[in-house]
Image (tube, rainbow, N blue to C red):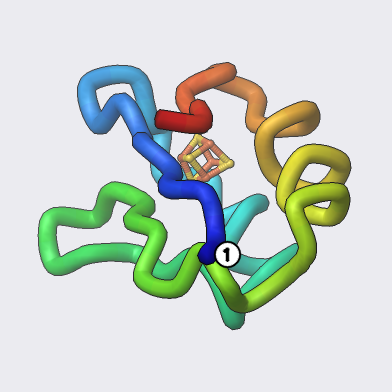
Amino acid sequence: MAREIWIDEEECISCELCVNNLPAVFRLAINGKAECYDPAGASEERIESDAINVCPASCIHWK
Ligand code: SF4
């Protein structure tokens, strides 16, 4: 089972980097903030390298 991801919406600046890098995992919610709709959409390694480690607001975390 894929590890769950938590995004601190207060910190998200809606830059869409995570969405562009991993569109099978992240999308922008109706409030303009990123949300993880499918944590199984990419490997944990790619989620770390292409989202968690590069998010400019450092607001994507494993639960
Ligand atoms: S990369 Fe970070 S700041 Fe940018 S949209 Fe994703 S969660 Fe928000």
Q: Which residue, as the protein is rendered here, is positioned at the far front?
A: 1
Closest to the observer: 52 or 4?
A: 4
The residue shown at (55%, 61%) is 2
Horizontal and vertical percent position of residue 30: 13, 67
The residue shown at (12%, 55%) is 31
Q: Quadrant of the C terminus?
A: top left
In which quarter of the view is residue 48 placed? top right
Horizontal and vertical percent position of residue 60: 51, 31
The residue shown at (87%, 41%) is 49
Residue under numbered circle 1? 19
Horizontal and vertical percent position of residue 27: 42, 69
Q: Is residue 60 left or right of residue 35?
A: right
Q: Is residue 11 left or right of residue 32?
A: right
Horizontal and vertical percent position of residue 12: 38, 31
Q: Is residue 49 left or right of residue 14?
A: right
Q: Is residue 24 above or below residue 26?
A: below
Closest to the observer: 57 or 47?
A: 47
The reply to whether the residue tagged 1 has its Cβ within 8 angstroms of ligand 1 is yes
The mark total stands at 1
